[in-house]
Amino acid sequence: MITINHLRKEYPNVTPLKDVNAEINRGDVISVIGPSGCGKSTFIRCINMLEKPTSGEIIVDGVKITDKKCPINLVRQKMGMVFQSFNLFNHMTVIENIMAAPVEILGKSRQEAYDAGMELLRTVGLTDKALNYPDELSGGQKQRVAIARTLAMNPEIILFDEPTSALDPTMVGEVESVIKDLAKKGLTMIVVTHEMRFAREIANRVFYLDQGGIYEEGTPEQIFDNPQKERTIQFIRQLKVLDKNIESHDFDFIGFVSSIEEFGRKHCISQRIIYHMQAVFEEFCVQIILPQLPEHFKMNVMVEYSPKEDVAEVKIKYDGGQFDPMTSDNELSLQIVDNIAESIEYSAISSEEYTNFVSIKIK
Ligand SMILES: Nc1ncnc2c1ncn2[C@@H]1O[C@H](COP(=O)(O)OP(=O)(O)OP(=O)(O)O)[C@@H](O)[C@H]1O
Ligand SMILES: [Mg+2]
């Protein structure tokens, strides 16, 4: 249904999409999730050409819509979009909002558009509001009208950009249930959302967007229960992360230790866990690993804290020859770490940058 090849979108100061590739099948319901600013809105706005991609191609139902000659109205008819902010015409009644495009763009008679519009209002549970103006509706009702208006064009694909994030919590459910019903009817849908529970329930596929592309994709079970890649795991588990590189033996030790303290306070981490993170850093990184490294080296220290589980983990990556810190003869440091660690795991790795990886889970 939709093929996306090497999609890139540059703005003057930032390039949110570097290289996006995807194959979306008819009937797919795709949840798009990812950190704020990673390009989710840009991604779906490019799909219906509300934003012009810098390069790459998008093919919808066999039509290359990124082609300059492609009539964009044809594309818009196939694809409806529902925005966070409803975008209803405030000077028109609800039913007029729904009838406008079918009459003006599809050339339907007013009667035909009215009948179809009333039927759609029934689907979203709002027949009694047909003659009201948008200002007289609640947020949830407005969004249901916006969905009915999109459906009035009989689209094959609907794109949703955070359809519930402008709503009062009490109204999220009514809009979600309308969208879920549509998903069951076999429409192809792409839904950007930060409601993880909804993203999971509605979709057959989840795209996790990060670092300019689809960083990881899978079924909801794969992405939410068993994410494979580092940034996906951090996002799904809502980890707080302190990420630092050390490349010289005379790095700022005090600065590093106090940045752990600062990180801990910022995220309301208990003093005990803060001490333990600092101790792991000092004993493992500084006392055991650093003395083993040559003059020029690369080391990455990542401190991760999970507020949900109130646990922390320190992950250390470094280059040089393979060296398992547990084989160190620095017994004092090993004992200190052993006392505060739930588990210590070492593995030799062969990524581009690092050759050793050790992760210490803190009790
Ligand atoms: N019209 C624009 N001009 C310049 N920069 C833009 C424009 N639109 C978006 N950006 C930038 O592109 C990046 C991606 O923005 P986008 O709105 O796609 O993110 P998002 O993932 O939807 O974020 P959120 O979760 O906050 O909605 C951001 O850094 C944003 O500031
Ligand atoms: Mg957005």
Image: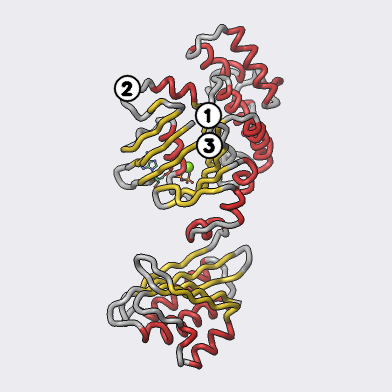
**How many numbered tags mark residues here?**
3
> Can residue 154 be seen?
yes
Q: Quadrant of the rendered structure where residue 306 is?
A: bottom right
Q: Residue at x 38, y 46 (%)?
A: 16
Tell me what residue is drawn at x 57 percent, y 15 percent. 99
Please provide percent x and percent y for residue 56: 34, 37
Q: Which residue is mark 1?
A: 157
Q: Residue 108: which quarter of the image?
A: top right
Q: Residues within 10 Å of mark 1 (few under 14, many from 20)?
A: many
Q: Secondary structure at mark 2?
A: loop
Query: Where is residue 48 drawn, in percent x and y?
Result: 44, 30
Instruction: Decide which of tag 2 and tag 3 comes sooner along the chain.
Output: 2
- Mark 1 and mark 3 lie on one chain; the one further toward the N terminus is 1
Q: What residue would you read off at disc 2?
A: 69
Q: CA distance from mark 2 to mark 1?
A: 21 Å
Instruction: Give the secondary structure at mark 3.
Output: strand
In which quadrant will I find the C terminus? Answer: bottom right
Which numbered marker is on residue 190? 3
Residue at mark 1 to residue at mark 3: CA–CA distance: 8 Å
Q: Is residue 198 above or below residue 106?
A: below
Q: Amino acid at mark 3?
A: Ile
Q: Is residue 291 above or below residue 227?
A: below
